[in-house]
Image (cartoon, rainbow, N blue to C red):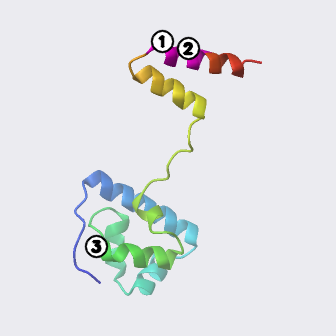
Amino acid sequence: MPSSVIKPPTSERQAFSRRLKNALDRSGQTRHDLANALGISYGTLGHWLRAEGDCPVGWVSPIATSLGMPVRELVEDPQPPPADPFAQRVVDVLESPLTAPDLMRLLSEARDRLP
């Protein structure tokens, strides 16, 4: 395994720890099962699960594989579902300088959505 260690801010380490705990629970494996599958000590895994130590980047993929999940689920929080396209357009228009044609198009689209 590569020895480079990611030094994330504490909040990132805590987020990784939370995602790892959730993934371990969903997998049905025990901590001992995962540590044995990875060939690491139970203590090392415990440090990662308690956000007391940094997980070397080279271990993220083997952990995901052992848990039967995509790597992305260990390193990123799920994204919220996309907003309603019309609602997003309203936000975009309101956050930008309003021009008369933009406002007219938005009002027309809003009228078309009324029952």
Q: Camera-side residue: 93 or 7?
A: 93
| Residue 113 place in picture, x, y as percent | 70, 22
Screen quadrant of the C terminus: top right
> For mark 1, what is the residue?
100
* Cα distance between the residues tagged 1 and 3: 54 Å
Q: Is residue 113 above or below residue 33?
A: above
Q: Which mark is residue 56?
A: 3
Q: How many marks?
A: 3
Q: Amino acid at mark 1?
A: Ala
> Which residue range is magenta in the image?
99-107
Q: What residue sits 50% from the left and 69% below the top?
A: 70
| Residue 98 place in picture, x, y as percent | 43, 16
Q: Is residue 56 above or below residue 50?
A: below
Q: Are marks 2 and 3 in contact (CB under 8 Å)?
A: no
Q: What residue sits 50% from the left and 19% below the top?
A: 102
Instruction: Estimate how packed mark 2 is, as few (under 14), some (14 to 19) or many (20 or more) residues with alpha carbons within 10 Å.
Output: few
| Residue 81 place in picture, x, y as percent | 57, 44
